Image: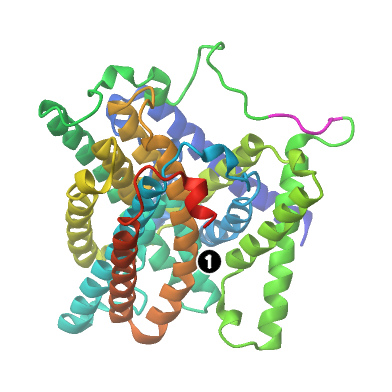
Amino acid sequence: MTGASMTNVLQAFCLLGLFLLIGTVLRARIGWLQRLFIPASVIGGFVGLLAGPQIWGDLTPIQYPEDWIRMYSLLPGVLIIPVVASVPLGIQLSQKGEGAATARNVFNMFLLMLTLFSLQIFIAGAVGALFATTMPDLGIYNTFGMEMPMGFSGGHGTAGVVGNMLNGMGLEYWEIAQGVTVTYATIGLIGGIIIGIAVIRWLNTRQLLEGSMNMASIPRSWLTGLEPDTDKQRPAGKETTISTSIDVMAFNVALILAGSGLAILLRGWVKASGLPVISAVPVWAYAIIVMWVVWIMMNKLKIAWLVDAGVKGKIASTLTDFAIVAALVSMPVHAVVSFLVPVLVTAAIGVAITIGVAFFPARKMFSSAPFERALLIFGTASGVFLTGLLLLKICDPDFKTAAMRDGSLAYSMNTVAGFILLPIMASMAAASGPIALAGLGAAVVTACLIGLFLVSKIKSGAPLNNVMNR
């Protein structure tokens, strides 16, 4: 490693930063981008893709060095390690303050989210198996199908998770899978917002919402992505350290990187030992385990106050933004386009099923604000939790219903379940092809239906902490 090579890395990051700034300006200035609520990282990433060699080859207006493209394709899988490692930090381990939340609504929301995720696995696996059988020349790879649930329910940031895991398994098509995940995430994000707003209008005309649709309630800053009013600018977090010793940002970054480093060493030791099954577990899974241990120890030692959830969240968001831009800029467009037909077929079926499952049973499952909860679930299952939050804010601008509170708890539970299922999905599909995904999805859906039946036996007024302590 030389000074020139380090400068090359810095220059590569500088270009990503430029695309992020371009995305920020375009989001702030172009109305249709604001109405679709497309993040600046996605806009900037597409600008970099459209201007780069991944589409135009040698005719590109901006010629990136070949090693930059390679670096960008690997970057999401690397950055996702500290992003995932940061998840446990700042989580409140005590649920004593949640006595007002009802167990039935929380668990129903969680199980419905997991049902949708599992149905997406089943649909994608079944469609992938169908195309692999009927159109063998298309070259459907074994893990084709896991991208839709990851892109829909995880968003653009999870492309790095998929790429990192498949790359770690030695599968040469990992870049294509990463690009396909980005494609699904884009379809889910835009489709989720457009369909969600249309559903809100339909529900509003039939007076099925506890509030009423109010697009005017969305702050201008949510549209532009900028907050010029200094009185409304929120603090990024609390300073739990004194900068004369160590800056709070540096402390949190150091803690996250230390945990990530331990996870990498742990996985290296496990792989070298040749232990079956667990040696195939991706490094980010070790990162979660390590950081849970760290966070529990910090709580036991009563030094959890050193971590501020706001600061931690900003670090994770920053890394995710750069990961998204890098994934888009390096997307192997021509390879992804070759799978466009099965991707579009899978996405169309997935969106239709997601709409039906999210809204149809809402009235029977939830004791209050059924369609507000359904909107949050639908947005989360098609374009990440923030999409669900956006749709909820349109019909419940002040979050007067319990949908936001209960949905946050349910989403946290669903995220844990998703991270558990992901390595299982990848291992089964790599060994047996997309049909294995269909089988896994069907099995989890069955388990969720059993869970929903059992939860229906819980009295709707039971406090969450009472049920969880049984």
Asked whether 94 falls inside the magenta stretch, the response is no
Instruction: Mark yes or no: residue 63 visible.
Output: no
- Residue at figure coordinates x 42%, y 51% from the top left: 156
71 on left or right of 24: right
Q: Magenta residues?
A: 238-243
Q: Quadrant of residue 247?
A: top right
Looking at the image, residue 310 lies above or below residue 267? above
- Residue at figure coordinates x 17%, y 37% from the top left: 199
Residue nearer the viewer, 229 or 456: 456
- Residue at figure coordinates x 19%, y 76% from the top left: 131
- Residue at figure coordinates x 70%, y 76% from the top left: 268
From the top left corner, tell me how far across and down residue 75 is, in percent: 56, 57
Q: Amino acid at mark 1?
A: Asn
377 on left or right of 86: left
Which residue position holds label 1? 164
Instruction: Mark yes or no: residue 70 visible.
Output: yes
From the top left corner, tell me how far across and down residue 98 is, in percent: 52, 39
Residue nearer the viewer, 102 or 281: 102
Image quarter of the N terminus: bottom right
Residue nearer the viewer, 171 or 66: 171
| Prevailing SS of the magenta stretch | loop
Q: Quadrant of residue 38?
A: top left
